[in-house]
Image (cartoon, grey):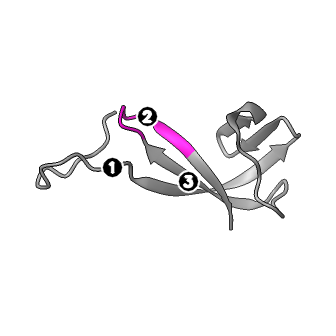
Amino acid sequence: MPAPQDAGSGGTPGPVPFTIKGFVKSFDGDVIVFDGVTLPKSAGFALPEGVAEGSEVDLVFTIAEDGSVVLTEVLAR
């Protein structure tokens, strides 16, 4: 699905980040499992300090130029 564009601007907008609230379901050092999202350690993400299983977090996503949705950051709430 392509990223939405403002037809009146005449230019292509940059990536627009958006945030989804989620909960850490589990974390075993190699895999972080959120509501519907599983991140392997190789993805380069770490949990913010003080965040543990059951903690509520903000998952920050960006829509890439090719239309794919990319997780860019995990924030403590």
Q: Residue at x 65, y 39 (%)?
A: 37
Q: Which mark is first along the chain, 3 or 2?
A: 3
Label 3 packing within 10 angstroms: few (<14), some (14-19), many (20+): some
The secondary structure type at the circle numbered 3 is strand
Q: Quadrant of residue 31?
A: top right
Q: CA distance from mark 1 to mark 2?
A: 13 Å
Amino acid type at mark 3: Val
Q: Residue at x 27, y 50 (%)?
A: 13
Q: Is residue 59 magenta?
A: no
Label 2 packing within 10 angstroms: few (<14), some (14-19), many (20+): few
Q: CA distance from mark 3 to mark 1?
A: 16 Å
Residue 48: percent from left, percent from top: 76, 58
Q: Quadrant of residue 41?
A: top right
Residue placed under numbered mark 2 in the picture: 68
Residue placed under numbered mark 1 in the picture: 14
- Which stretch did the figure color magenta? 64-71
Amino acid type at mark 2: Ser
Amino acid type at mark 1: Gly
Where is the C terminus found, in terms of image quarters?
bottom right
Residue 39: percent from left, percent from top: 70, 37
Give the side of residue 35 with respect to residue 4, left or right: right
